[in-house]
Amino acid sequence: MKRNPLFQNVPEEALRDAARVVTQRHFAAGEIVVAQDAQGEALHLLTCGVVRVSRVSTVGRQRVMGEVYAPGVIGETAVLSGRERSATVQALGEVTTLMLHRTHFQQLLQRHPQVLWNLSVMLVERVTFLNDELIAFGLNTQAALSHVFLHLYRQRLAAGVPEPATLPLSTTDIMQRISSSRETVSRVMRTLAGLGMVQATPNTVVLLDPEGLGDLTLEEADPAE
C-alpha cells in the first residue's frame, strides 16, 4: 500500500488505519472494476495489473481515455463528488485492488493530513495532464498522437513494464483514443514512421525515439490538421 501515490510518505499509523478498512478485490481479464453512471461509493487502490478507462458519450460513441497501472488509484473522483461514475474501468489482465469506501476514506483524510496532501497533488497532476491533452488535441493529429504515445510510454516506464516503448496499440485503439478516422491515423502514423519516431505493427506501436517524439515542433506537424 505504501507504494500507492495516495499513501506515499505517510506515517505508519495511517497505513495501519487504512489496512484495517480496505477490502482486497480480484478481477479477471475483461471484468469491469467500476462502471460508468454507477454510484461511486468506493475507490480502488490498484496493487497489481493494469486497467483501461473508457467513456461512452451521450450519442453512444466510446472514447478510450487511457490506462492506469499499478500502483494507481481508480474511482476517487466519484467518491469525492458524490456523483455517478464518469467512466468505465476494465481489467486488461489479472488485476488486484484494495477497495476503500467513502466513509473510511473521509476518516483517513481527517485523521492524516499527509493523505489529504497526496490527494491534492494527484488532482493537480491530473488537471495539468488534462490541460496538456486539451492543447495537444487542439493542435493537430500528430500532436495528439505524440501526447498519447508519450503518456502511455511514461506510465509503462514508471510501472516497470518490460519493453515500455512497445505500446500495445492497434489502429482501432488509436482511433478510439483520439476520436479520429482510420485514414487520418494511418496517414499520420506514416509521417511519424518517416521521421524515424515510431514503427507500427498490427497490434503494437514501437517508439524508436521517445525524446525526439516529445521534441517535435508545431512546424513539423501536418499543417492541414
Image (cartoon, rainbow, N blue to C red):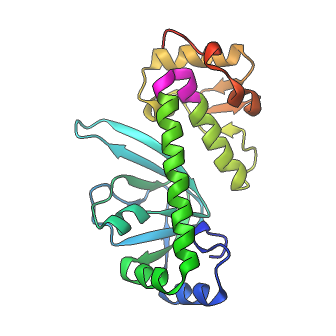
Residue found 70% across the figure and 13% down from its top: 194
x and y percentages locating residue 79 in the rendered image: 36, 68
> Do we see residue 166 in this rendering?
yes
Q: For residue 9: magenta?
A: no
Extreme-top residue of the structure: 224
The residue closer to the viewer here, 162 or 21, is: 21
Type of secondary structure dominating the magenta stretch = helix
Residue at figure coordinates x 60%, y 19% from the top left:
189
The x and y percentages for residue 180 are 43, 24
In the picture shown, does residue 206 fall above or below 225? below
Vertical relation: 14 (above or below) 142:
below
Q: Position of residue 11 (x, y in %)?
A: 65, 85
- Residue range (magenta): 138-145
Instruction: Report the side of 91 relative to 162 (left or right).
Output: left
**Figure disc tally:** 0
Pick the front one: 43 or 218:
218
